[in-house]
Structure formats: C-alpha cells, structure tokens
Amino acid sequence: MSDQGEIILEGKSYKLPVIEGSEKEKAVDISKLRQDSGYITIDSGYGNTGACKSAITFIDGDKGILRYRGIPIEVLAEKSDFVETSYLLMYGNLPNRAQREEFRNQLSGHSMIHEGMIKFFDGYPTTAHPMATLSSMVCSLSAYYPEHLDPKDKTHVNHLVPRLLAKMKTIAAYSYKKAKGQPVIYPKTDLDYCSNFLRMMFGTPAEEYKIDPLMVKALNVLLILHADHEQNCSTSTVRLVGSSDANLFASVAAGICALWGPKHGGANQEVVEMLQLIEREKIPVKEIIRRAKDKNSGFRLMGFGHRVYKNFDPRARVIKVYSDKLLANMGIKDPLLDIAKELEEAALQDDFFKERKLYPNVDFYSGVIYRAMGIPTDMFTVMFALGRLPGWIAHWMEMHSEGDGRIGRPRQIYSGETERPYVPMDQRK
C-alpha cells in the first residue's frame, strides 16, 4: 500500500488506499467506503471489481499473458502434465520427484467411487445432460466423507483434495458410459491420470484398451489450458459458496453448475455446432464474415473475442498446434478443422476484426480436438469442468487459508416500489 486515491461525495472527501499487486496491477480499496460515507459502488458483471487478492493465476489480457503461479501457460503445456500442473496450482510450487510420485499414487489409488454411488447413475434417464449428472454426483460425495468436511481443518482438506481430483474423472467417464448404455470400466491403478480417463471413457470389458500416447498428450494439454483462469464466473461461484464454509464438494458442485451455462463452459460446443452448420449448409466463409459484421443478421461468430483478452488468447496459440498434430497423426481429415482455419485466416485479415481485437480464443479449436478424440459435444463442458477442477480447488483452499473469513455478501441498489399500503382483496382492480 503506497498511495491513496480520493473520492468526493456531497462535498466531502474520502481517502481510499491504493493496493499494488506483484505484477504492478493497481486497485482502489473501497472496503470501508460504505462504513465511512454511506455509499456503495455498482459494477454490473464485476468487470471493474476485485473480489479478492490471489497468488494463483496472472492474466494480462492486453499482452496475451497467462501464467500459473508465475509459470507461462505455453511452458506448462509443453513440459508438464495435468497432474503436475494441478499440484502447482493447489500447493504453490512444482512438486519434487518424491512429491510428484506420492501425488500420482494418491490420484490412482483414490480413483474408485463407492459402489453405492454407481447405482445412482441408474436413476438418471439416458437423455440427462452429463453436467446434471456430474454436479449431482460431486455434491453426493459429501455424503461419503461426513467426518472430513470441515474447510478450516487442514487434515480434512488434505484428505479430500486428492480424492475429489481422482474421483471426478471417474464420475465424468461413468456419466458418459451410462448415457451410452454401456457397462462402466473400473480404473486401473497402474495408469496415469489421462490414460485412466480415456480407458474408462472408451474401453469395454470385451477387449483391452490400447493407450494412444498422442491422445494422452493432447488431453493433458487441453486440461492444462483450462486448469485455471482467475476470477471467472465458476471460480467466483466456488469462492462465494465456499465463503459460507460450505464443504469442498458442495462448493465445486456449485462451480460445475455455473460452468454449465452456455456463456461460460458451453462455448466450445457452440463453436462445433456453428462449424457443422457452415459445412451442412455449405455457407461460404466470406458470407459468414459478412453476417458476423452485420449486427442485424442475428448471426454470431463463435470462438472469437474474450472478456479478458484484448490480444490473441495464449491458450488458442497452443491448442492450434496440437489440433494440427493430433489430426495429422490420427490420419483424420476433418472438414470442420479446415473451415475453422479458413475462418481464422479471413477474420485476422479483416479490418473489422482487427480494429475490435477479435482473435480466436481457446474454445475455437478445443471442440475440434475433442471431436477428433471421439468425445461427443454434450461432454465438452464436462471436459472443461474436469480441467478447471484444480483451479477451483486452489481458489477454495486459498480463500480459507489466506482470506479474511467473511462470507461473500454483495450489495445492491434497490429500484423497486417505495413503501405502499396493503390493499385488501375486495379493493384490488
């Protein structure tokens, strides 16, 4: 705290502390504004409001920078894997060799879910959206660990964190299997995290599932790229719910529900559906660009632009490279990828997009990769949730270990009726 701001309300001056972060970001601390002046601030969508201080993820949207605990996302995507990146996010540092092996063993050893929970899947109709199943099942985990739910007890937290990270991939895979009418595949303790998930998704009891190293690498990259993204809608939800001292499972289940919304986690599904529409109706790319620029056309070009990034989404740069590698090595000629590349090239050369800094975001290519891996579109948001899980956990842990312990309680400006009388029934019009 090195400076002060000032606000003048009704002729009276109020000093407001200025806080500076480690990357020179600055904020005006208004935490005592209402107490001192009777005023609050209003910021629809919280685009200018900091809800907390956090040491987990840094984003510079103007420069296209994304770092987890100080490490650039491009480096992690190339050199790390999802398990190691999860450890980094949740515990603050990359694990040493012994820590990494212990963590991997925990995730492998806790992959099974209670047999009673498997019966829950039978109660869902085959038409149930996988996100409905995922959120319900994660919340249901609370019932199986009643003695370890205190968020203030580090022993409880350390007990639950690897279990949730391990079991969520199993729940996600089982929700897919049940929707397909196929038997569930139990996890194997000798497989790594992503290999285990792919086997549980696509394996059958009739034959041994062959692990494709390229598929494993692609999945690791996708999950890493989605692992955290600062105070987005779902992460803020996890923090807000967690501020009531709700347990880890309940808080994460709330985050899953927030992610379910098409404005948040469903964007990559919308990209694929848009590309399918373009292919099916054989719409020229020039026409798509024209419609996107015409505000009266009713058409929206999905996968371009981002609330935070006013430059190229760094995750999109990484994911484009892996989409090319994966499809080339699998021998897949996907027309949707060709359309996506043509759209990107046309948009990046168009002044309309350049002036508005509308660049492809992470959702533009992630759906194409998931599609190539055989993952259906209604599972895309589940994959997003699986990747975002360590970020949710990290923020939930940080909030309880470093926060002020206050329950989240936003204010409002009331805009309804002023006080009026109660009208008896026989006098109402």
Image (cartoon, rainbow, N blue to C red):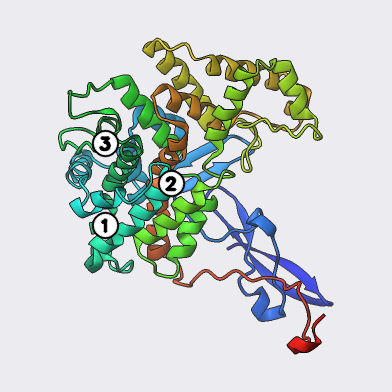
Q: Position of residue 84 (x, y in %)?
A: 30, 39
Residue holding disc 1: 160
Side of 252 relative to 101 (left or right): right
Under mark 3, the amino acid is Tyr
Side of 413 relative to 371 (left or right): right
Q: Position of residue 237 (x, y in %)?
A: 50, 58
What label does residue 131 carry, if any?
2
Residue holding disc 3: 193
Q: Position of residue 195 (x, y in %)?
A: 26, 30
Q: Do the numbered discs 1 and 3 sit on residues whose CB atoms are within 8 Å? A: no
Q: How many marks?
A: 3
Does 330 sit above or below residue 420? above
Instruction: Provide the secondary structure element on which disc 2 rests.
Output: helix
Identify which residue is drawn at 40% across, 52% down.
Answer: 135
Identify which residue is drawn at 28% across, 68% down.
Answer: 153
The crowding category of the residue bearing disc 2, from other C-alpha atoms within 10 Å (few below 14, some 14 to 19, many at least 20), is many
Residue 409, by quadrant, is bottom right
Does 274 sit above or below residue 394? above
| N-term-proximal mark, 3 vs 2 | 2
Identify which residue is drawn at 31% across, 26% down.
Answer: 216
Under mark 2, the amino acid is Met
